[in-house]
Amino acid sequence: MFATNLRRLRHAKGLSQDDLAYEAEVSRSYLSQLEKGVFYASLKIVDKLARVLDVEPAELLKSPKRRK
């Protein structure tokens, strides 16, 4: 869920991985691995990313809405 939401929200904000990584003070390679689901993010990282994306941290952890 996290990886999918992170990528979706980053795209919705029009940010590149480089831009988001810079603003959240993480490396671009680490961000890339988070978006691929290779690494898990700590709560501290979730908070940093949420702040840059201007969403509540829970938004990054939500299950996607099911289509009917």
Image (tube, rainbow, N blue to C red):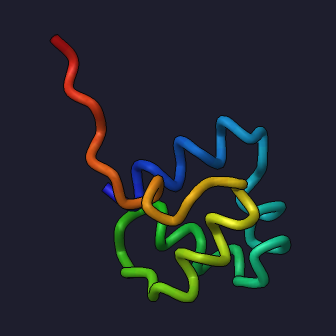
Residue 56 drawn above or below residue 63: below
Judged left or right of residue 44, residue 36 is left
The residue at 76%/51% (across/down) is 16
The residue at 33%/52% (across/down) is 62
- Number of numbered markers: 0
Residue 57 drawn above or below residue 16: below
Judged left or right of residue 29, residue 8 is left
Position in image of residue 42 (x %, y %): 45, 88
Position in image of residue 21 (x %, y %): 74, 71
The residue at 52%/55% (across/down) is 6
Q: Residue furthest left?
A: 68
The residue at 57%/82% (across/down) is 45
**Quarter of the rendering containing residue 47:** bottom right
Which quadrant of the rendered structure holds the C terminus? top left
Q: Residue furthest top?
A: 68
Looking at the picture, tell me which residue is in the foreground, 30 or 63.
63
Position in image of residue 36 (x %, y %): 41, 62
Looking at the picture, tell me which residue is in the foreground, 49 or 33.
49
